[in-house]
Image (cartoon, rainbow, N blue to C red):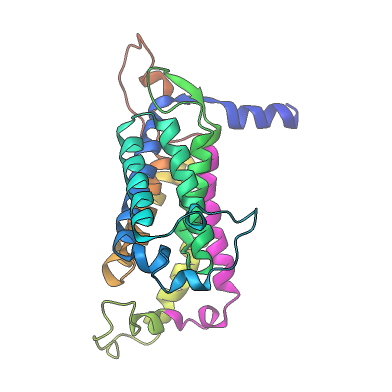
């Protein structure tokens, strides 16, 4: 088999449209959580009455934003409400193609406006909108569709973990195993008032290296069908711990919802007239 045929088979193999429906609901929910988190800070972040917009560089043709067209408090509120309605429409399935286009414009607009203040998951959501725009279907009535958008959405999550590992391993604090100790004593931690002096020597350093190992190995577990179920469980547990001990719960919620992309219903279980309704949520064959 030549390379072109292998790539076509990899990206265009048929998958159940129920998997696209699950991706639509998961990503729409992640975007909604992020939007709810931004809502109380909308004026300080986006309006002409806040402090942050004064630091935003002049917009160029490649860094356009709806906020450069209007950023009064009422205009900012209207834009966020539009994005809120688009999230609900995407989750429910009302004109999902139009809703995801609106959400992509929203994410590009606020990403260009906020610039360096963005979190890593902002890029994940923005790129996810774009990849979902390219989806061949968003659920029934079509029973199967090419899986290329799902493949790219999954690989984006894996590349995020590998990118995070690469950046961490460049940092001397991570290599020396002192980041977890520092984090637990910082304002980002819910446990900063606790005394960790009674822990065994090297325990916190071990946690630091465990995080590095997890970010390196977890994508392989998610991509390999044999280890995918364990990878999903490990990843969800990892982000639950982050959400419990830190003040960055939105990040954890967004990442956990992205694990739904690795669940799959087999095409045969949703085809019309099939003799079985068996679901396969544990194995995605790449």
- Figure quadrant of residue 246: bottom left
Picture residue at 65% right of the left edge, 53% below the top: 61
Q: How many numbered callouts?
A: 0
Instruction: Say which quadrant the C terminus sits in.
Output: top right
Magenta segment: does it hold 144? no
> Does residue 254 appear anywhere in the picture?
yes
Which residue sits furthest right?
Answer: 2
In the rendering, at what x and y percent does residue 5 appear? 70, 26
**What is the span of residues highlighted in magenta in the rendered image?**
150-179
Picture residue at 50% right of the left edge, 34% below the top: 285
- Figure quadrant of residue 20: top left
Which residue sits furthest bottom?
Answer: 197
In the rendering, at what x and y percent does residue 104 appear? 48, 44
- Figure quadrant of residue 211: bottom left
Which residue sits furthest left?
Answer: 194
Residues 129 and 280: in front is: 129
Please identify the dominant SS of the magenta region: helix
């Amino acid at each position: 088999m030549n390379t072109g045929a292998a790539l076509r088979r990899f990206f265009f193999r048929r998958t159940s449209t129920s998997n696209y429906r699950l991706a639509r609901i998961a990503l729409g929910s992640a975007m909604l959580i992020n939007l709810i988190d931004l809502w109380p800070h909308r004026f300080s972040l986006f309006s002409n009455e806040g402090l942050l917009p004064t630091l935003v560089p002049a917009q160029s043709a490649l860094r356009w934003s709806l906020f450069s067209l209007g950023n009064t408090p009422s205009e900012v509120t209207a834009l966020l409400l539009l994005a809120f309605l688009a999230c609900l429409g995407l989750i429910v399935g009302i004109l999902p193609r139009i809703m995801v286009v609106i959400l992509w414009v929203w994410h590009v607009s606020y990403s260009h406006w906020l610039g360096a203040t963005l979190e890593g998951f902002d890029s994940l959501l923005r790129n996810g909108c774009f990849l979902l725009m390219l989806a061949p279907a968003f659920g029934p009535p079509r029973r199967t569709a090419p899986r290329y958008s799902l493949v790219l959405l999954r690989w984006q999550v894996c590349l995020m973990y590998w990118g995070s590992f690469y950046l961490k391993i460049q940092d001397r604090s991570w290599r020396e195993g002192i980041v977890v100790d520092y984090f637990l004593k910082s304002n980002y931690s819910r446990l900063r008032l606790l005394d960790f002096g009674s822990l065994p020597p090297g325990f916190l350093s071990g946690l630091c290296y465990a995080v590095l190992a997890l970010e390196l190995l977890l994508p392989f577990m998610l991509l390999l069908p044999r280890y995918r179920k364990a990878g999903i469980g490990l990843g969800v547990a990892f982000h639950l711990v982050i959400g419990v001990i830190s003040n960055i719960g939105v990040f954890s919620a967004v990442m956990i919802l992205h694990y739904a992309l690795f669940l799959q219903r087999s095409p045969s279980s949703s085809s019309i007239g099939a003799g079985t309704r068996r679901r396969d949520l544990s194995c995605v064959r790449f």
